Amino acid sequence: MIIIDIVKVFVPTAFAFFIGIAITPILTHYLYKYKAWKKQSVQRTLDGREATISASLHRDEIKKTPRMGGVVIWASVTITILGAYLISIIYPYDTTEKINFLSRNQTWLPFFTLLAASLIGLVDDILVVSGRGGYIGKGLPLTARIFIVLLIGLIGAWWFYFKLGVSSVDLPFWGQFELGLLFLPFFMLVMLALFSGGVIDGIDGLSGGIMATIFSAYAGIAFFQNQIDLAAFCAVVVGGILAFLWFNIPPARFYMSETGMLGLTTSLAVVAFLTDSVIVLPIIAFPLFLASGSDIIQMLSKKFRGGKKVFLVAPVHHHFEALGWPSYKVTMRFWIISVIFALIGMVIALVG
């Protein structure tokens, strides 16, 4: 039985990777044909101040690197999931039915979340690369994106609370902690916190390597919990990310951008709750929380310390770039940190 489970997890993962590799030339042809990159560098920080250092680091209008590379991830995941499902329907044999991992209790919700959020992110990216004026050239306002994430979180929380009967979280080495109706806002806040970690997508190869590590950790947790369909879903996402990463390592052919990060972060929140390991999420996804936390610290410092900054530039990975670290060194060291914290989080989740 264990052999079948391993095949169910790893075979679709390989398919997702090769599908992602196969569709990338088509995608990049159109991204470059229609010049799908930012037409200007970052001009303002989140608090409205002039982003002089960020603008000098990014120089998007000079690099001319397209956005929307995240399409490779969710497209390859979608093709793999639906392909396995259709094969099991058209050829209803034991083998094909065991390969299908689209199930109501494990993968419907994270798959729906990944697709819905990714498509919303795609709209944002299209607006960003379309030019200037209004939302065009700037993308959806941050408040609109936050509202959308909270709405997706509310739908997910409702499903968990009313459909699955989940109202508590597991505290490692302690047990279940009952939240009652507070589970709903807690779920939404976790999803929002992960969404804020999307700022990690700022250096070639950085976000891809980190997200692949995080989803690999949750694939392992789900597998050991005997949630094989969910483990397969997480692993297939890793396959899609690795296909993206193949073309995103320096020099990047494209950036993941919002259509990738929005889908990945929101579906990650769902996976964390499905595995009842949301408490260790800040450990497994430490680089995401580090990136968003450094942004928050920077804004609070400038507001309450008379404009003084803690970092040369936030998020923190750009701080190291500003110190003179080559971007590839920042990326690889963050990859190492990501792997170490993911392993620690997995151990706590499984042992605790």
Image (cartoon, rainbow, N blue to C red):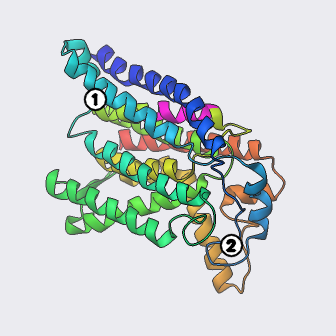
Question: Residue at 60% of width from left, 51% of height from top?
Answer: 201
Q: Position of residue 275 (x, y in %)?
A: 31, 43
Q: Amino acid at mark 2?
A: Arg
Quarter of the view holding residue 346: top left
Vertical placement of residue 125 versus 352, above or below: below
Q: Which stretch is magenta?
A: 237-246
Name the mark nearer the viewer: 1 or 2: 2
Vertical placement of residue 205 versus 184, above or below: above
Q: Farthest residue to the right: give it.
A: 324
Name the residue beneath numbered marker 1: 101
Crowding at dot 1, Cα within 10 Å, few <14 / some 14-19 / many 20+, comes out as many
Q: Position of residue 168 (x, y in %)?
A: 24, 57
Question: Residue at 31% of width from left, 21% of height from top?
Answer: 5
| SS of the residue under disc 1 | loop
Q: Position of residue 163 (x, y in %)?
A: 15, 52
Report the magenta stretch's main SS.
helix
Crowding at dot 2, Cα within 10 Å, few <14 / some 14-19 / many 20+, comes out as few
Could you tell me which quadrant the N terminus lies in? top left
Q: Amino acid at mark 1?
A: Phe
| SS of the residue under disc 2 | loop
Residue 44's mark? Answer: 2
Can residue 187 be seen here? no
Q: Is residue 239 magenta?
A: yes
Counting residues from the N terminus, which is met first, the one under dot 1 or under dot 2?
2
With 203 as the anchor, is 116 left or right in this view? left
Q: In this view of the protein, which residue sits in the foreground, 72 or 110?
A: 72
With 234 as the anchor, is 241 left or right in this view? right
Quarter of the view holding residue 221: top left
Q: Is residue 274 magenta?
A: no
Q: In this view of the protein, which residue sits in the foreground, 213 or 65?
A: 65
